[in-house]
Image (tube, rainbow, N blue to C red):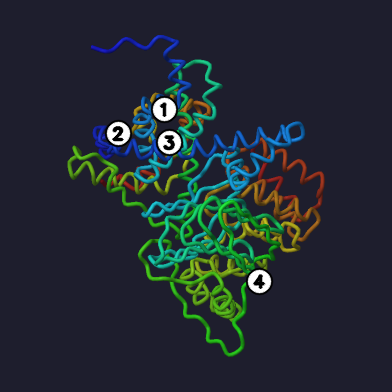
Amino acid sequence: MMAAPPAPAALRAEALDPDQLFRRHAPYVAAIAHRLLGRDLDVDDTVQEVFLVAVRSAGTIRDPEAVRGWLARITVRLARRRLRARRVKQVLGFESTPGYETLADRAATPEERTLLMQVYRVLDRVPAGARVAWVLRTVEGARLEEVAALCGCSLATAKRRIAEAQRILQEALGHV
Amino acid sequence: MSDWFERVVESRGHVAPRWSREREEQIQARLQSARQSAGRARLAAGASLCAIAVAACLLFWQNRADSHRAVLVEHFAAPQVPLLTLPDGTRVTSADSSAHLDRVALSETAVDLRLVRGSAHFEVTPNPHRAFRVMAGSVRVSVLGTIFEVALDEHTVRVSVERGRVRVESRNQARELGVGQSATIATEPDRPSAPEPGEPAMPHTSTRADIGHPSLSRPHDTGASIPTWRESATKGDYQAAYGQLSRAHFQNIGVDPSDLLLAADVARVTGHPMEAVPLLRIVLEEHGSDARAPLAAFTLGRVLYRAGRAASAAHAFHQARALAPRGALAEDAWALEIESLIRAGDGPGAESRAAEYLRAFPDGHRAQAVRKLVAPAH
C-alpha cells in the first residue's frame, strides 16, 4: 500500500533541505544519468553536479511537487554537456571508447547485456542532443511531450532528434 | 519495427545503475565537501562588501579566508565540471566556465597537464612516487599532494594554494608556495623550447591519456618534438608528420598559428579531417586578428560541411567572410554559407544571405551559382 503523499509543508521543507533532497532523489537522478551516460564514473560526477546546482537554486523552487521533474531537467542538461565533451575527447584520442561493462544490471541475460552494449557503442557516434532524446524516449520510456520538456526543445525538434538517432542505430544494428 | 529495437525495449529495464548505500554515501560526502567550500566563499564575498564600514571584519576574513577566496568565489560562481579524475581520488575540476585542460601524459610515476585557458581547481592525493605537474602558459606548477588552483589569462598565471605546498617555475624564477599563499606570474605565450646545441633530441613517447601507460613526454620536451613533425610536413611527408603528431596526441604543436594551420593541413591531407577542427578553432579563438584567420575559418567550414555538420559549417563560413569582407575568400565563403544553410534546413536564412550577397556582389563570380541555389525557394 503506497504511503500518502507528503503534505505541502513537508514537501517544501524537503525541497529546501539539501540532505533530504539528496537522500530522497539521488537514486532517481542516478538512474537517469546512468541511462544517458552509461558509465559509473560519469554517473557519480553528474549526480554530484546535479545536487550542487539544485542546492544553489533550491530557493527558487515554487512548486515543491515538481522537484523530481526539475531535477530530471538538470540531469539531462548536465549529461548532455558531458556527452559533448566526451565526444570531443574521443575524436582527439584523449579518452578511450567506453566499454559499457556496467551498463546492464546483474539480472540481464548475456544476450541482453551484449545488445545493450552494442546499442550504446553506436550511440557514441550519435550527436549528444539526438542521443539524449532517443534514450529518454526508448530506454527511459518517456512520452514525447516529456522528452521535449526534459530536453528543453519543441515537440517537433524532439521527434527530429529521436528520428536522427534511430536512423543511425538502424544503419548500424539493422542486421542484429 | 526492427527486431533489435523490440529487444532493446524489452530489456530496457536492465539499464540501471548498481546503486548502493556505500556509493550514495560517497557521493554525498563529496557533495557536502563541495558545499562547505562554497559556503565559506559566500561568507567571504559578503565580508568583502562590508569591508569599508567594518575594517576589522575585513582583516579577520582576509587572514582566515585569503587562501580560499580566489578559489572558492569561483567555485560558488560557476558549476564545477570534472576535468580529470584519477583512481587514487585526485580530482581536477573547472573553476570557471572557460576552463580547458589538456592531458599531456598520465602514468603511475608522472601526471603532466596543460591548462590551456581559464581556471581549474586541483585536489591532488599525496603520492611521493608520482610527480604531478601543471603547465599554464610558460609557468609550471609541481606538486606532491595538495589542493590548489591555477588561473590562466592572457598575460598572467595565478597560483593559489589551499593545502600543502607547490613549486612554481617560470623562465626566470622558481619559488615554493605554502598554505594560504598565492603568486601571480607574468607569462609568455606557450612556445616550444628548442633543444640546447649538442643536446640529443628526446625520444618520442606516446601520450595516451590512460593510467598505466609508461611515462611520456614532459611539458618542456615539446620543443624537441616540434621540429620533427614540422620538418616532415615541410618536406611533404604528411603521413610521417601525422604519425609524429598523433603519437604525441597533437600536444607537440605549440600555439603559433603557423604551426596550428600546418598541423591542421597534416590532419586533413592524411584523411583525418575532424582532427583539424580543434586546431582551426584555436586559431580563430586565440588568433582572430591574424591575417590567416579567415583562411582558418574557411577551411573549418569546408571540413564541417563534408562531415555533414551543415549548421556549424554555415557559422564557420560566416565567420570567414566577417573576418575579411573584401578578402579573396569572401564571395566563396558567402556562397558556401548559403549552401550550408540550405543543407541545414534553414531555407529562410539561406534566402536572406543570398539577397545580401546579390546586393553586395550583383556581378560577383558566385552570383549565378547563388541565384540557382535559392531559385527553387522562390
Q: Which of the pair B61/B128 is nearer the observer? A: B61
Chain assignment, label 3: A
Does the image show residue B311? no
Where in the figure is residue B37, as x and y percent of width and height?
A: 52, 39
Q: Residue at x 53, y 86 (%)?
A: B200
Q: Which of the pair A161/A147 is nearer the observer? A: A147
Q: Secondary structure at mark 2?
A: loop
Q: Which of the pair A42/B152 is nearer the observer? A: B152
- The CA distance from mark 3 to mark 4 is 55 Å
Q: Residue at x 39, y 51 (%)?
A: B89
Chain assignment, label 1: A
* Mark 3 or mark 4, whichever is nearer to me: 4
Q: Residues within 10 Å of mark 2 (few under 14, many from 20)?
A: few
Q: Secondary structure at mark 1?
A: helix
- The CA distance from mark 2 to mark 4 is 65 Å
* Mark 1 or mark 2, whichever is nearer to me: 1
Where in the figure is residue A51, as x and y percent of width and height?
A: 46, 32
Q: Which circle marks residue A163 in the picture?
A: 3
Q: Is mark 2 in CB contact (under 8 Å) with mark 3?
A: no
The residue singled out by tag 4 in the image is B171
Q: Quadrant of residue A4?
A: top left
The residue singled out by tag 1 in the image is A19
Where in the figure is residue B279, as x and y percent of width and height?
A: 59, 61
Q: Which circle marks residue A153 in the picture?
A: none
The residue singled out by tag 2 in the image is B1
